[in-house]
Amino acid sequence: MGTFLSRIKFRPCINCTHRDIVSENSLEAIREIVSSLRNARTLGNGWLFRGEGIAHQGVVNEIVAYIEHGSSRSVRTMLEAGWRLESSQALYTYLTRLNQPLIPFSIQSLVLDASNIDVTPEIVASDVLGLIREELSSRHKVLIGLILHLLDCSIKLSPADELRGHTLPVSLLPLFFNIENYHFMHEWRRILAIFVELIRQAPNALLVEESQSEALL
């Protein structure tokens, strides 16, 4: 477990303010990546967010800069040139540099609080998504929705290991939650079950307006 659940340190990103987790232009660049990666040909190999040591790091850094500066056209050009693995790793790198947690600590507490142990993962996930809809800005909601939707596509389209199932949600837990040693030892199965349910519910809960807009294009 320890190899997956390494702590992620958040660093400031370019063009973000304390009140705004992502700029509109950066969000558009992220949409380009998610749109390109959420298909069977790309995700079937199971390498989403796992390109470290394989991806061309110079290209990864270049794409990170494009995302930070909100250059969606440059991101699209890189994707069309076949740099999907590097785009996946660049998106992951960008997310670790956000100026605030992807899910605010106040909302994370619903998942991490052991007092909710008797509440089903489905209900906890629904409550978390409800708070995200009510308390976060439109761009923040869409950002979370896009990333969870991409994970949902990856899980559905990538074959699971017969013994371990899908390891992708496990490896990305620290990106969404402030996981402590106590959680590693006692709570990770419950937290993982809630996270998987969040991934399953998020597209309908957070991206309905996005889907409607795409349908009109």
Image (cartoon, helix red, strand yellow):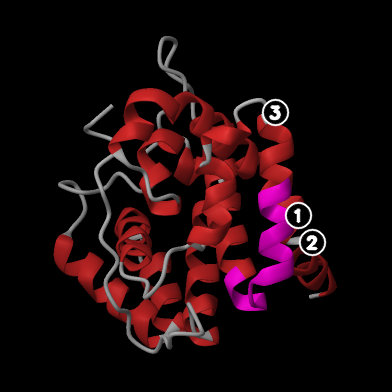
Q: Write the start and end of the magenta stretch as one range.
A: 127-140
Query: In 3D space, how far apart are the residues under numbered discs 2 and 3 (Cα atoms)?
Result: 24 Å
Q: How many marks?
A: 3
Amino acid at pointer 1: Ala
Nearer the observer: mark 2 or 1; the answer is 1
Would you place residue 21 above or below residue 130 in this image?
A: below
Which residue occupies the foreground of this view, 133 or 90? 133
Magenta stretch: helix, strand or loop mostly? helix
Q: Which mark, residue 208?
A: 2
Q: Is residue 165 left or right of residue 57?
A: right
Q: Which mark, residue 39?
A: none
The residue labelled by disc 1 is 205
The residue labelled by disc 3 is 120
Q: Quadrant of residue 64?
A: bottom left
Query: Does residue 137 belong to the magenta stretch?
Result: yes
Q: Quadrant of residue 167?
A: top left
Crowding around mark 3 (Cα neighbors within 10 Å: few <14, some 14 to 19, many 20+) is few
Nearer the observer: mark 2 or 3; the answer is 3
